[in-house]
Amino acid sequence: MKFEPTLRALADLTRLRIMRLLADMELAVGELAQVLGQSQPRVSRHVRILCDAGLAERRREGSWVFLRMAIGQGREANGLGAALAHVLTAGERADAGFAARCAEDRRHLAAIRAAREAQAAAWFARHAAEWDTLRLLHSPDGPVEAALVEALGTLGDGAALGALLDVGTGTGRMVELFAQHADAVTAFDKSPEMLRLARARLQHLPAGKVDLQQGDFTALPFADGAFDTVLFHQVLHYAQEPEAVLAEAARVTRPGGRIAVVDFAAHGREELRTLHAHARLGFSDEQMVALLAAAGYAPAPPVAIPGQPLTVKIWTGARTAATPPQQPTRKAPA
């Protein structure tokens, strides 16, 4: 990172606003355009300047481009990058006018994301009853489930999974599959309609074996270290901020406990955003390994289950005893 070009890149109010938004979370360029009230080509020009200066980094996902801050973390955790990150934070605190603009940007972003989440929730409510059939449109369940059983080491008898949390349980298929291998199962979902169907599906299980709870996977209502195993089955691609979701999962996983993420490999099927409310077009191995490690898991080699039209991946990891790096604190709308 060179000093003079970097300062020139920051000598613009729009780019300063972008950097303050990126301090909170990774954002799609389209989201930035909406928040800033500018055209996407204009915002893309600002993004190019920030990336050329080493202040931000792009990540392409289908036709969408996501942007994250590249200073004050990772390889830029010290030196000029760390100093610039500190200056940007201090600048917002010291300049009341700039702080007000940044707060308004965050409120606008929160409203955009809330509307998108409401649309996704409405989609789930409409399609809850046909959810298992919809899943079959992407890849067969049988090979995926067999590979997941093997990955979690539940081929034998006994409670190999301990206390299991199934995040985004849907209609309860994963609970049905793994209940016999767990001491207890918590089936968690945001959709009351999904939980109603899961309750009907799982009523044959022993009383007290399964606890169904409703809530948001970005704020799990469980104590730290409450679970031995955490499972995300075809759920994480609905997350606007998968890093925040996995950080919450790590919080409720005991040291030495395990996580399994079953999801699509990175793909370009743009229609899934609108037809099935997907927020992410799958994940690359590099991306998922980085997400798991940042949350506090030691990733294991992934397992691939090729399918038509999409390949499914199973990523697993063990919770480390060390505390993971602090996740950026999301600022609530004022």
Image (spheres, rainbow, N blue to C red):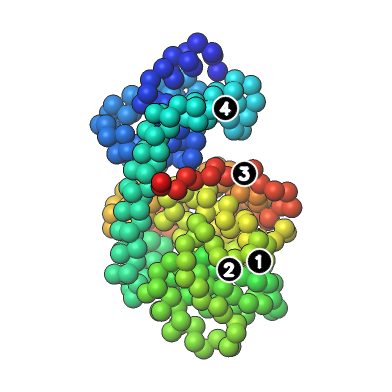
Left or right, 167 with respect to 154, comes to left
Residue designated by label 3? 326
Q: Spatial distance from mark 2 to mark 1, Cα to Cα?
A: 9 Å
Residue designated by label 1? 226
**Dot 1 or dot 3, earlier in sequence:** 1
Amino acid type, residue under disc 3 in the picture: Gln
Is disc 2 placed on a helix, strand or loop?
A: strand
Q: Spatial distance from mark 4 to mark 1, Cα to Cα?
A: 35 Å
Residue designated by label 4? 86
**Dot 4 or dot 3, earlier in sequence:** 4
Amino acid type, residue under disc 1 in the picture: Ala
Amino acid type, residue under disc 2 in the picture: Leu
Q: Spatial distance from mark 2 to mark 4, Cα to Cα?
A: 38 Å
Residue 80 spot, x, y in % from top left: 59, 20
Q: Spatial distance from mark 4 to mark 3, Cα to Cα?
A: 16 Å
Residue projecting furthest to the top:
4
Q: Spatial distance from mark 1 to mark 3, Cα to Cα?
A: 20 Å
Q: Are marks 2 and 4 in contact (CB under 8 Å)?
A: no
**Dot 4 or dot 1, earlier in sequence:** 4
Q: Residues within 10 Å of mark 3 (few under 14, many from 20)?
A: few
Q: Nearer the viewer, residue 93 or 258?
A: 93
Question: Which is more foreground, mark 4 or mark 3?
Answer: 4
